[in-house]
């Protein structure tokens, strides 16, 4: 499958490496930060750093890549329907605690609420933040975690599991 990857931070790095391990073809990487950009560079992947991701220029560049799917893992910008429509399979986003905390800072909200379970969810992308149909969501017990870093450290393996599950469902046509 031909994929354009968009993401950042450690979770983005895990997502990019997970997709590469699956042997999916990374036709372009849109890094949010140096973490993902450095990994892309180390594998000689094409990198695109748009000023405005929904611009006409971005549309042209992304369309030329003829990708099947856009995958976002900790991407920070909202992707418009003009961009999502370029992909045969649309886009999917990987987000922590999708079951309850859509949008920014879900782990902080989880800790404030005293929740004991966290998750990594994958959903189809729409212009509405974290509003698309959920493809998969994998839960992890975090009752022993007291900080954002501790929760993320516990969730990082789950990013790979959830992304693999969502990709399997997508390739089987059951999502």
Image (cartoon, rainbow, N blue to C red):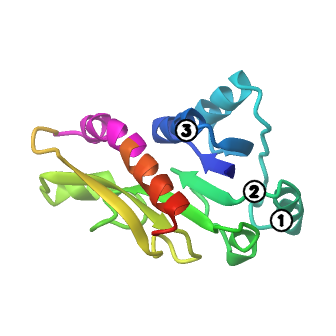
Q: Residues within 10 Å of mark 3 (few under 14, many from 20)?
A: few
Report if residue 75 is visible in the image: no
Q: Which range of residues does the magenta coloring cover?
A: 146-160
6 in the magenta segment: no
150 in the magenta segment: yes
Residue 87 in the image: state x and y as whole percent.
Answer: 72, 66
The CA span between labels 3 and 1 is: 27 Å
Q: Quadrant of residue 160?
A: top left
22 sits to left or right of 70 = left
Query: Marks 2 and 1: which is nearer the front?
Result: 2
Q: Which residue is mark 1?
A: 59
Q: Which mark is residue 67?
A: 2
- Name the residue at 59% across, 54% down: 71
* Mark 2 vs 1, N-terminal side: 1
User: Is 137 located above or below residue 45 in the figure?
Assistant: below
User: Is 104 located above or below residue 88 in the figure?
Assistant: above
Q: Are marks 2 and 3 in contact (CB under 8 Å)?
A: no
162 sits to left or right of 38 = left
Residue 70 in the image: state x and y as whole percent.
Answer: 65, 58
Residue 61 in the image: state x and y as whole percent.
Answer: 87, 56
Q: Which residue is mark 3?
A: 22
- Name the residue at 12% across, 52% down: 116
Q: Secondary structure at mark 2?
A: loop
Report if residue 70 is visible in the image: yes
The residue nearer to you, when weighing 135 against 113, is 135
Dominant secondary structure (helix, strand or loop) of the stretch shown in magenta: helix
* Mark 2 vs 3, N-terminal side: 3
Q: Secondary structure at mark 1?
A: helix
Q: Which mark is residue 144?
A: none
């Amino acid at each position: 499958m031909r994929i354009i990857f968009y993401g950042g931070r450690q979770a983005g790095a895990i997502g990019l490496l997970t997709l590469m391990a699956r042997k999916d073809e990374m036709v372009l990487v849109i890094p949010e930060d140096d973490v993902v950009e450095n990994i892309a560079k180390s594998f000689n992947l094409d990198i695109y750093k748009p000023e405005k991701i929904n611009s006409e220029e971005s549309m042209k560049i992304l369309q030329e890549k003829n990708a099947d799917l856009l995958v976002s893992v900790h991407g920070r910008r909202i992707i418009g329907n003009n961009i999502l429509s370029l992909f045969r399979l649309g886009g999917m986003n990987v987000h922590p605690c999708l079951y309850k905390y859509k949008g920014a800072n879900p782990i902080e909200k989880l800790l404030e609420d005293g929740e004991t379970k966290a998750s990594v969810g994958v959903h189809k992308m729409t212009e509405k933040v974290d509003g698309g149909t959920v493809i998969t969501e994998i839960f992890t017990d975090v009752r022993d975690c007291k900080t954002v870093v501790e929760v993320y450290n516990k969730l990082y393996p789950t990013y790979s599991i959830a992304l693999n599950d969502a990709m399997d469902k997508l390739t089987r046509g059951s999502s």
